[in-house]
Image: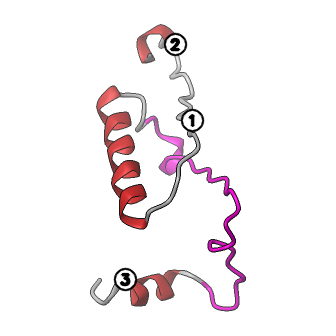
Amino acid sequence: MGGTATQVYAVFMPTGLVRYQHTGEMHFLTFSCYRRLPYLAAPETRGLFESALERIRKTYKFVVAGYVVMILPLQNVPLSQLL
């Protein structure tokens, strides 16, 4: 898909939404992995997520007050193996 970031953004975001990103208020963001697959179970992928978050934070100059990466235990895998 080509085009500028604004054009790509416009394709995926409905028009008429009220956006509050520039109010100076704190925001809460949550997401889950595609089909709740355990993509963040491996330390390498958690590190990749953290690196991406830091790169975006610096690019857009926002503050991250805190974040939590929650991992649902895999069936028959002890939690101690995931940490």
For the residues marked 1 and 3, what is the alpha-carbon distance in whole angstroms? 28 Å
Res. 60 mark? none
Q: Which residue is mark 1?
A: 68
Front-lying residue, 36 or 40:
40
- Residue beneath disc 3: 5
Q: Regarding mark 3 in the picture, which secondary structure is present there?
A: helix
Q: Residue at x 45, y 35 (%)?
A: 38
Left of 83 or right of it: where is 30?
A: right
First reached walking from the N terminus: tag 1 or tag 3: 3
Residue 64, how many percent across, how many down?
53, 48
- Name the quarter where the C terminus is drawn: top left
Residue 3 to residue 31: above or below: below
State the residue in front, 42 or 17: 17
Residue 59, percent from left and from top: 36, 64
Left-right relation of 40 to 55 = right
Q: Secondary structure at mark 1?
A: loop
Question: Which residue is identified by label 2?
Answer: 79
Q: Secondary structure at mark 2?
A: helix
Q: Residues within 10 Å of mark 2 (few under 14, many from 20)?
A: few
Dot 2 or dot 3, earlier in sequence = 3
Foreground mark, 2 or 3, reads 3
